[in-house]
Image: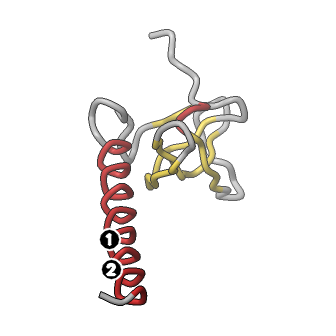
């Protein structure tokens, strides 16, 4: 085996491993044990409240988590007239006192 062959095979193995780790991270972030928020739920952070329209995975340094995208709502529970959307990070969600 030549050094070029070794380097190519090593790169292929590393690429497969990276893809598998990313798949595992997405699986964890979206699992029921980690993520209880679904599309259509209302979530609140330090900025305000949104109604979730989509969920993406954020590969954090510590552990994978979710980013929720949605239409921003007022304190009265009505959507902003501008139709403004924004993201809320899972780590910033305020817990309800219910």
- Of the pair 34 and 13, the residue shown nearer to us: 13
- Of the pair 28 and 54, the residue shown nearer to us: 28
- Of the pair 78 and 71, the residue shown nearer to us: 71
Whether 10 is drawn above or below 81: the answer is: below
Indicate how the structure is coloured in the image.
secondary structure
Tell me whether circle 1 and circle 2 mark residues in contact (CB < 8 Å).
yes
**What is the quadrant of the C terminus in the image?**
top left
Whether 61 is drawn above or below 82: the answer is: above
Number of marks: 2
- Of the pair 86 and 4, the residue shown nearer to us: 4
Image position, residue 21 (x, y; %): 35, 55
Q: What residue does disc 2 label?
A: 9
Q: Give the SS element for disc 1.
A: helix
Q: Quadrant of residue 74?
A: top right
Q: Name the residue: 52% across, 19% down.
A: 95
Q: CA distance from mark 1 to mark 2?
A: 6 Å
Image position, residue 90 (x, y; %): 52, 36
Q: Give the SS element for disc 2.
A: helix
Image position, residue 38 (x, y; %): 35, 42
Tell me the tag on residue 72.
none
**What is the quadrant of the N terminus in the image?**
bottom left
Q: Name the residue: 60% across, 40% down.
A: 78
Q: Name the residue: 53% across, 36% down.
A: 62
Q: Residues within 10 Å of mark 1 (few under 14, many from 20)?
A: few
Q: Quadrant of residue 73?
A: top right
Image position, residue 32 (x, y; %): 27, 34
Q: What residue does disc 1 label?
A: 13
Q: Quadrant of residue 76?
A: top right
Quick check: 90 left or right of 15? right
As drawn, the residue found furthest toward the top would be 97
């Amino acid at each position: 085996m030549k050094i070029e062959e070794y380097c190519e095979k090593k790169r292929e193995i590393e690429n497969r491993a990276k893809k598998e780790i990313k798949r595992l991270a997405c699986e964890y972030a979206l699992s029921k044990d980690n993520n209880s928020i679904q599309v259509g739920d209302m979530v609140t952070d330090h900025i305000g409240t949104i109604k979730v329209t989509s969920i993406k995975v954020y590969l954090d340094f510590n552990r994978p988590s979710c980013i929720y995208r949605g239409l921003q709502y007022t304190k009265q529970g009505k959507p902003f007239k501008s139709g403004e959307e924004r993201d809320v990070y899972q780590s910033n969600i305020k817990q309800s006192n219910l």
